[in-house]
Amino acid sequence: MSSKLLFPYATNSSQSLRVISEYTTYGFIDEDGFLKMDLSLGSCGCFPIGFKRTDVVDKVCEKIKDAPFSSGEFYTTHPAVIELGERLYNMSGGYRSFFAVSGSDAIEGAIKIAQLYNGRNQFLGFKNSYHGSTYMSSSVSDATYITNTFGKDPRCVISDYNLDSITDDLCAVVIETASWQNGLYDPGKDFWVSLRKTCTDKNIVLIVDDIAMCGGKTGTFFGWTGIVEPDIFTMGKALTGGYFPLSATCLSEKIFDSIKDIMWAHGFSYSFNLSGVYSTLAYLDLLEQDKLLEEVPQLIDRTKELANRLIEQGLIKEYKNHGLVFNLVLLNKKPLETMFESFLYKHGLYAGLWNEGGNGLLFVVPINAPPSWFIRLESCLVKALTDYAATVALSS
């Protein structure tokens, strides 16, 4: 299909388009009229309650008529912005917020706050991490999509989860609650405890990137709950239920007290839009009214049962999960890696963002998933993984 567009992360001289004509509750209808389940729910679970909650969209659109703009800059704000800040403060146990548009923006802001706090200028990220596509957020990531082309800030170093890398001159450590790109690798409880203690002892700011794991996927709104206590944490994606863009950077009282008398020079390009604030408030109301987070433990158990049946059938090796975010680990390295997504697509599954790498298949369970969702997912997975295994065997 010919196009007059420039597509990101694509070789545009040979890019083929996959046109989505209509969204369904948890997927879409493709160009040939076939239903596809979106395994990543719009990228790492941006839409945890599905794509068809028009009630959220209607609420936002109605409110935006009265106040179409509020940047939060130059001593002006809006009651909805104050309300969201207060709700997040109470929910998180005392973290203050500022808002932007994207996860990358949130990480940039977190790094700036860390510099204001301790005056240092070195940053540590971890192996196979991804924190964004702006200069600093990509530099503190291990992902090379941006840095291979545009370069990397020399102040950023990457560690293989080695705490000896945390030296006294560091300004901040940036780490994901659970890394989508790293297949939900879990460094373990001892690592998290030691990381928190080391950062405290050395007065290093611990920034937890909760962008992909927040929004209720773990049964709480914050994916880091019960794992570690951040100095700063960031949210995005499912923060708003997915319907309008907003990100949040949340800082502890210790950090706030240290920087509150310094001008916070982080706006303009990083300004938020009121639609995202309204969307977050509407999503939080839905979670409370429908008591959706109470159902998450049962959904996790049901997904584990599904994964165990795939293991028993010899279709996967094992699985990992962080709440409702799952990674099905395949039997071996993908010898047909570039074709793997096509097997899924053939059998009704859309892999989503960055799902073609590594030895696993990542997916997000909707926090309101009905029994029919699990039935269809298992049927499609069995067909796709069986077909793939047979093709791999023939190619060996």
Image (cartoon, grey):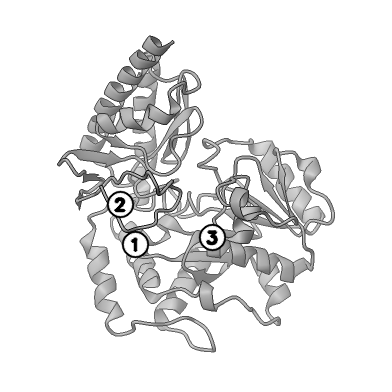
1 vs 3, front mark: 3
Instruction: Check disc 3 and report its element: helix, strand or loop.
Output: helix
**In this orientation, does residue 94 appear?**
no
User: Which label sits on residue 18?
Assistant: none
Q: Which residue sits at x=81%, y=41%?
A: 164
- The answer for how far apart the CA atoms under marks 2 and 1 are is 9 Å
Quarter occupied by the C terminus: top left
Above or below, 331 against 76 in this view is above
Question: Residue at position x 55%, y 55% from top?
Answer: 132
Asked which secondary structure carries label 2, the reply is loop
Q: Amino acid at mark 3?
A: Ser
- Residue under label 1, please give it: 283
Residue 83, placed above or below residue 95 = below
Labelled pair 2, 3 in contact (Cβ < 8 Å): no
Residue at the image point whose x is 38% and y is 82% from the top: 69
Which of the 4 image quadrants contains residue 68? bottom left
Please tell me which of labels 1 and 3 falls first in the chain. 3
Q: Residue 201: x, y in percent?
A: 81, 54
Q: Which residue is mark 2?
A: 49
Label 2 is placed on what type of residue? Ile
Question: Where is residue 176 drawn, in percent x and y?
Answer: 58, 48
Q: Do tag 2 and tag 1 residues touch (Cβ < 8 Å)?
A: yes
Mark 1 vs mark 3, CA separation in Å: 22 Å
Q: Earlier in the sequence, mark 2 or mark 1?
A: 2
Q: How many marks?
A: 3
Q: Is residue 38 left or right of residue 135?
A: left
Tell which residue pokes out farthest to the bottom in this image.
75
The crowding category of the residue bearing disc 3, from other C-alpha atoms within 10 Å (few below 14, some 14 to 19, many at least 20), is many
In the rendering, at what x and y percent does residue 336 appear? Answer: 43, 23
Name the amino acid type tagged 1.
Answer: Tyr
- Disc marking residue 104: 3
Q: Secondary structure at mark 1?
A: helix
